[in-house]
Amino acid sequence: MGTSYELKLVPAPGQTAPADLKTQADELLAQINKQMSTYDPDSELSRFNRNPSADWIAVSPELLEVVAEGLRISELTGGAYDITIGPLVNLWGFGPEPRRDQAPADQAIAQARERVGYWRLHARAEPPALKKDRPDLYVDLSSLAKGYGVDRLAELVEANGIHNYLVSISGDLRAKGHNGKGQPWTVAIERPVPGQRSVERLIQIGDHGVSTAGDYRNFFEQNGQRYSHIINPHTGRPVPQTLVSVTVISDLDMEADAADTALMAAGLDLGFRLATEHHLAAFFISVSPDGKSFQERYTPEFEPFLLPQQP
């Protein structure tokens, strides 16, 4: 996944973590990568993307599970989130192809948009299979696979008898129980400033997953304009700079991982409306009209997780 993972474990009194737990975790994540990576040309997903067939193609239950969740979020958001957005992500230089630091031509954007459309992708549970309506459809699970990996790591830790933990892959987290001091797990929402690491707000996430999407880490600038890796499927272009960060808390981190990207792509007004309508615990950070400060907005479902701001 091009990043690192972390396990923070609090065994019960007299309990020790299994000596091979890291090996188990490494093998688990390597397997997920072999199923869902677009960076590995031999992964199961890459082979599916290259397959020109319009018939049902057998896939693993794990790949089907993640694609089905992506289709659900795509439908739920009316395409503000779209798991077939890969051609646009690649065109803008944020995929496995060589990085580019300039905006593509309008014609190239229009051509890539023709290949995007989640309604052209179909999932079947029994037996597990996927089907695409056009041969050049390209599925990108980058906004789901990390969250799925976090959920699987949590399952692995619990299967080894440890029920107080915080697991993370990059900015995706899932916690349960308490930390080493016997207190609920507390994590920070980062202030969305490029090149800096500072805290915007602290949250106690309880037994939940949390994921943050933002435009302030993965981007390029051209003629004073910032272009981020989060693409609006309806325009084919990176999201405007008004909304800079969305954090979502959910029972499953895979759901939070997809939802934060969907809300970012939808923009501040539509994104907040979608979060409210679907009762998501979501926290939005936007740039003030004068561009000199940040503004916070969050749904009622998010408020219980927020710790009081320090003076």
Image (cartoon, helix red, strand yellow):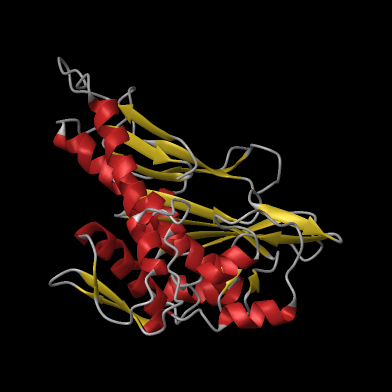
Q: Quadrant of the C terminus?
A: top right
Q: What residue is at 43 percent from the left and 70 percent from the top?
A: 83
Which quadrant holds residue 92? bottom right
Residue 238 visible? yes
> Where's residue 123, x and y in %?
26, 75
| Residue nearer the viewer, 186 or 5 | 5
Which residue of the protein is positioned furthest toward the right in this rendering? 223
Figure check: 289 above or below 94: below
Q: What is the tally of numbered marks visible in this picture?
A: 0
Residue 37 screen position, x and y as percent: 41, 53
* 293 with respect to 281 (left or right): right
Q: Quadrant of residue 237?
A: bottom right
Name the residue located 13 percent from the left edge and 72 percent from the top edge. Answer: 126
Q: Answer left or right for 53 relative to 188.
A: left
Q: Position of residue 113 (x, y in %)?
A: 57, 80
Relative placement, left or right, of 258 versus 197 is: left
Q: Quadrant of the N terminus?
A: top left
For image coordinates 47% across by 64% down, the residue present is 299
Q: In the depicted view, which residue is nearer to us: 302 or 77?
A: 77
34 shown above or below 223: above
- Can I make out residue 287 in this image? no
Above or below 61: residue 118 = below
Outermost residue, top side: 14
Residue 107 drawn above or below residue 182? below
- Residue 220's image quarter? bottom right
